[in-house]
């Protein structure tokens, strides 16, 4: 029996990186996948085909996760197409890194809206569906810098710390209806985003990690699978660090 057989998962920001790995991992475990990205483009179409190859239903949607009305509309479309939502993975996120003294109001607002408001938007839109079903698992993508902070990332750290507080509150509000909510805090994960960093910066990161390597998107996907599946049926309101021991 596959871990997510017959379940429908919604994954935001899934056309690349961690989101894409989560979508592929879930599909391999039997989940039907509805995923969003900012635009419906070739990457989205290619992922639809990759996911469908697992024999599951898969569909991509263009969605600005930071926009409340847009999110409500896309969730309504997903329900029309899939009939139910068992798992929500809030993964959409961006960075606009700079020291606070140089940070513009626009850089602050953009990161808070895309990273934190999007989690409110999608959770709010999916909540009535899960309440009706009396079941559901919500997994929110935070970060180790949301736990410990990081110089040059005040906006990103604040958004990711906000996700942790939000997740713990939602877990308390919805637990009595058999709806769980948890957060994952990835550490230094090797993606396109981190691949653009200079070699010495990447080495500086990996030297600080007890496991002496960056994580992979698959490492994060495996932890997300655990929280999405019934293996974690008694786990709610928690933050799981996937960081190679960097945050202990």
Image (tube, rainbow, N blue to C red):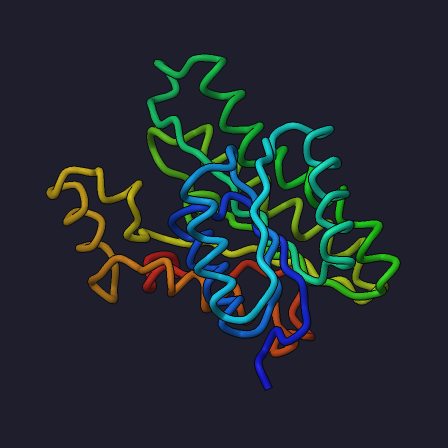
User: Measured from the top left, where is residue 225 in percent x and y?
Assistant: 53, 68
Instruction: Confirm whether residue 241 shows in the render.
Output: no
* Residue found 49% across the figure and 61% down from its top: 51
Quarter of the image for the N terminus: give it: bottom right
User: Measured from the top left, where is residue 77 in percent x and y?
Assistant: 73, 43
* Residue found 65% across the figure and 54% down from its top: 88
* Residue found 31% across the figure and 40% down from its top: 193
Quarter of the image for the C terminus: give it: bottom left
Q: Residue furthest left?
A: 200
Q: Quadrant of residue 71?
A: top right
User: Measured from the top left, where is residue 149 in percent x and y?
Assistant: 42, 40
Instruction: Confirm whether residue 196 shows in the render.
Output: yes
Relative to 7, residue 202 above or below: above
Q: Quadrant of residue 85?
A: bottom right
Front residue of this view, candidates 60 and 122: 60
Q: Residue furthest bottom?
A: 1
Relative to 195, residue 106 above or below: above
User: Measured from the top left, where is residue 126 in percent x and y?
Assistant: 75, 48
Q: Is residue 3 left or right of residue 130?
A: left
* Residue found 49% across the figure and 21% down from its top: 108
């Amino acid at each position: 029996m596959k871990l997510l057989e017959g379940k429908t998962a919604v994954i935001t920001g899934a056309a690349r990186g961690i989101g894409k790995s989560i979508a592929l991992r879930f599909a391999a475990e039997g989940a039907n996948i509805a995923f969003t990205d900012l635009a419906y483009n070739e990457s989205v179409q290619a992922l639809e085909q990759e996911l469908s190859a697992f024999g599951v239903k898969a569909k991509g949607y263009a969605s600005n996760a930071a926009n409340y009305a847009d999110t409500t509309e896309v969730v309504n479309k997903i329900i029309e197409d899939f009939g139910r939502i068992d798992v929500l993975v809030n993964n959409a996120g961006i960075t606009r890194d700079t020291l606070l003294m140089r940070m513009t109001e626009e850089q602050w607002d953009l990161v808070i809206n895309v990273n934190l408001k999007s989690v409110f938007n999608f959770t709010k839109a999916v909540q009535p569906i899960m309440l009706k079903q009396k079941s559901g698992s919500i997994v929110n993508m935070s970060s180790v810098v949301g736990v410990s902070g990081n110089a040059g990332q005040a906006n990103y750290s604040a958004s990711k710390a906000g996700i942790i507080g939000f997740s713990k509150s939602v877990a308390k509000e919805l637990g009595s209806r058999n709806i769980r909510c948890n957060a994952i805090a990835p550490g230094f994960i090797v993606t396109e985003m981190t691949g653009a960093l200079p070699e010495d910066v990447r080495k500086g990161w990996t030297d600080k990690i007890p496991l002496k390597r960056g994580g992979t998107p698959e490492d994060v996907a495996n932890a997300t699978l655990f929280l999405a599946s019934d293996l974690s049926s008694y786990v709610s309101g928690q933050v799981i660090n996937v960081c190679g021991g960097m945050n202990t």
